[in-house]
């Protein structure tokens, strides 16, 4: 069976001519409708939820504005989104496509509308934004303001289309050849090599290998999405900025899955810090949101604590680290970051084994 991601990518590739051939500037609307159809074929429950929510939000915004109940509507609908997202994650045997990205995009629109930074979008604008086919499966968590500007300004430029196609090919090579082939073989060889090593160290090494494979797979899939969007005349937000060149753990998280960390910074970290007057509380809430976005489980609760602890320790050690010469510090930083990230899995696994 063809992987779901491959089906979405092939459908998005087929949608490129649609984006340019549909008249009256409605090409992206047609791509969104095709996205809903593809979603319905793969996961009818996802299509029903996302389609209904996308239609209801603009209408609810208009009614809330007339009734002077913007805050109440934004709060209640955000709660409904979070409940639905939690139910989607905890429902066994049901395939949910794009629910995590969809939820964050909806909350972004609600939050910016409530704060007065965004007028209530129309139904068509929400449909093309939420159901844009290239970003349906792997994101990024792009913002509606930038997306609408891209939709109105897009022009046929062969150079952009060719650059997008080149990025699709490069992303496919990173994801499939490096991430899903070469590094899988390397992991298997590493596991055989470490059979006689202490299980904790073995788990740590394999976890580090998995982080590297995750980067190539996820960054590659994101590059495919961005390339397909570029072929349609849309420039989406970047998601990775050389994360393994980061100077420290905080710098790493600002370079890794940028659209998610940017969203968390705007809608979790800053509100919590403003409410509590505590940067530590904001950090803990932000990392918890990132962890639970991946999976609602006790493992990811502990994972978020581990990542927060790493950032705090890095801040405390900054004066001592500054004494190390620049060249070796820059060379050792990626290894230290990878070591801390990969150490989370064996440590948390042992902690969970101790629980009743």
Image (tube, rainbow, N blue to C red):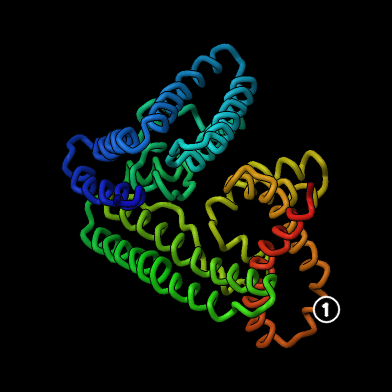
Q: Nearer the viewer, residue 128 or 168?
A: 168
> 287 or 145: which is nearer to us?
287
Viewed as shown, does residue 272 lie left or right of 259? Answer: right
Please provide percent x and percent y for residue 102.
47, 38
Q: Compared to 100, does 209 lie above or below?
A: below
Judge left or right: residue 150 versus residue 196: left
The residue at 46%/50% (across/down) is 140
- Using the rendered view, name the quadrant where residue 68 is placed: top right
Q: Is residue 24 above or below residue 288?
A: above
Q: Looking at the rendering, which quadrant does residue 197 occupy?
A: bottom right
Q: Is residue 176 above or below residue 96?
A: below
Residue beneath the point at 33% across and 58% down: 227
**x, y percent for residue 239:** 49, 58
Q: Secondary structure at mark 1?
A: helix
- What x and y, as percent, mark residue 322? 77, 79
Using a 10 Å C-alpha cutoff, classify the residue at mark 1 as few (fewer than 14 neighbours), some (14 to 19) or many (20 or more): few
> Which residue is disc 1 drawn over?
320
Instruction: Say which residue appears at 44% left-offset and 28% top-offset.
Output: 49
Evaluate whether residue 247 shows in this view.
no
Image quadrant where residue 160 sits? bottom left
Q: Residue at x 61, y 71 (%)?
A: 246
How many labels, in total?
1
Residue pushed farthest front? 196
Q: Is residue 20 left or right of residue 109?
A: left
Q: Is residue 237 left or right of residue 267?
A: left
The answer to whether one can see residue 135 in this image is yes
* Extreme residue toward the top, this view: 67
Residue 4 locus on image (x, y percent): 35, 48
């Amino acid at each position: 069976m063809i992987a779901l991601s491959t089906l979405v990518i092939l459908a998005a590739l087929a949608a490129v001519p649609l984006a340019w051939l549909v008249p009256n500037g409605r090409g992206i609307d047609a791509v969104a409708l095709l996205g809903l159809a593809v979603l319905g074929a793969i996961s009818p429950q996802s299509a029903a939820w996302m389609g209904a929510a996308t239609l209801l939000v603009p209408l609810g915004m208009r009614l809330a504005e007339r009734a002077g109940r913007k805050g109440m509507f934004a709060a209640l609908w955000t709660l409904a989104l979070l409940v639905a997202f939690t139910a989607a994650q905890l429902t066994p045997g049901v395939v949910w496509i794009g629910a995590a990205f969809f939820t964050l995009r909806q909350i972004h629109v609600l939050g910016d509308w409530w704060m007065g930074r965004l007028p209530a979008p129309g139904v068509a604008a929400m449909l093309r934004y939420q159901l844009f086919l290239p970003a349906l499966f792997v994101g990024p968590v792009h913002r509606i303001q930038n997306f609408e500007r891209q939709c109105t300004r897009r022009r046929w430029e062969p150079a952009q289309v060719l650059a997008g196609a080149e990025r699709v090919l490069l992303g496919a090579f990173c994801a499939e050849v490096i991430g899903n082939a070469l590094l899988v073989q390397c992991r298997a060889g590493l596991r055989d090599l470490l059979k006689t090593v202490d299980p904790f160290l073995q788990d740590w090494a394999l976890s580090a290998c998995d982080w590297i494979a995750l980067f190539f797979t996820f960054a590659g899939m994101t590059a495919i999405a961005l390339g397909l969007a570029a072929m349609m005349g849309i420039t989406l937000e970047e998601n990775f900025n050389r994360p393994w060149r980061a100077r420290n753990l905080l710098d790493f998280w600002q370079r890794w899955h940028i659209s998610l960390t940017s969203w968390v910074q705007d809608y979790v970290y800053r509100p919590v810090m403003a409410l509590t007057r505590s940067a530590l509380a904001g950090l803990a809430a932000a990392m918890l949101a990132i962890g639970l976005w991946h999976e609602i489980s006790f493992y990811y609760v502990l994972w978020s604590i581990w990542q927060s602890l790493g950032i705090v320790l890095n801040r405390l050690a900054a004066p001592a680290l500054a004494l190390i010469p620049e060249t070796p510090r820059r060379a050792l930083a990626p290894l230290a970051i990878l070591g801390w990230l990969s150490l989370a899995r064996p440590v948390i696994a042992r902690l969970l084994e101790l629980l009743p």
